[in-house]
Image (cartoon, rainbow, N blue to C red):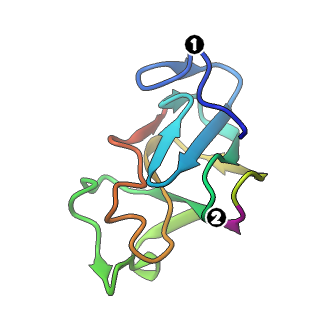
Amino acid sequence: MIGAPPPGEGVGVHSDDGLINIYTDEYSLVASHMSTGAGEVTFTLLNNGSESHSLVVIRTDRSIYDMPVYDNFVQEEQLDVVGKIEAISGGTTESLTVTLEPGKYLLMCNLRTHYTLSMRTSDHFVVE
């Protein structure tokens, strides 16, 4: 098991260095920080579960409840996907570095049914 977020990480905490850990298991997704500055941001997906999970970073002002979902998938082609980590096995990690502009972003797993099972941040990830 890779572990849960350490103290000092979690909703409402700003990352000064642009390093964001994403912790997943069945069926939750928690970001170590919910805001950072514009520029280069590295997301590290830590899959604590036994099933495969992914990470999709979408720039959007839409509510998490207003995503275009069809056949148990968020329709990524209708959104501004700025980065993605394809499915990784349980107990593994993978990183993604992207350049983000100021704005609101949604972080989610988009494997079949995972988004609808709440594998997403509970609010927008904010880039200032």
From the top left corner, tell me how far across and down residue 48 is, in percent: 64, 46
Residue type at numbered disc 2: Lys
Residue holding disc 2: 84
Q: Classify 10 Å Cα crowding around label 2: few (below 14), some (14-19), many (20 and above).
A: many
Q: Is residue 115 above or below residue 48?
A: below
Residue placed at 41% from the left, 52% from the top? 120
Query: Label 1's element?
Result: loop
Left or right of residue 88, residue 64 in this image: left
Q: What secondary structure predominates along the stretch shown in magenta?
A: strand
Quick one: 72 or 105, which is closer to the camera? 72
Q: What's drawn in magenta, residue-wise?
A: 83-89
**Residue 118 in the image: x percent, y percent?**
34, 55
- Mark 1 closeness class: few <14, some 14–19, many ≥20 residues within 10 Å: few
Q: Residue at x 77, y 53 (%)?
A: 92
Disc 1 or disc 2, which is closer to the eye?
1
**Residue identified by numbered label 1:** 7
**Residue located at (67% from left, 32% from top):** 3
Q: Residue at x 21, y 63 (%)?
A: 66
Alpha-carbon span between mark 1 and mark 2: 27 Å
Based on the picture, tell me whether residue 88 belongs to the magenta stretch: yes
User: Can residue 128 be seen in this snapshot?
Assistant: no
**Left or right of 122 on screen, residue 31:** right
Q: Quadrant of residue 75?
A: bottom left
Disc 2, SS = strand
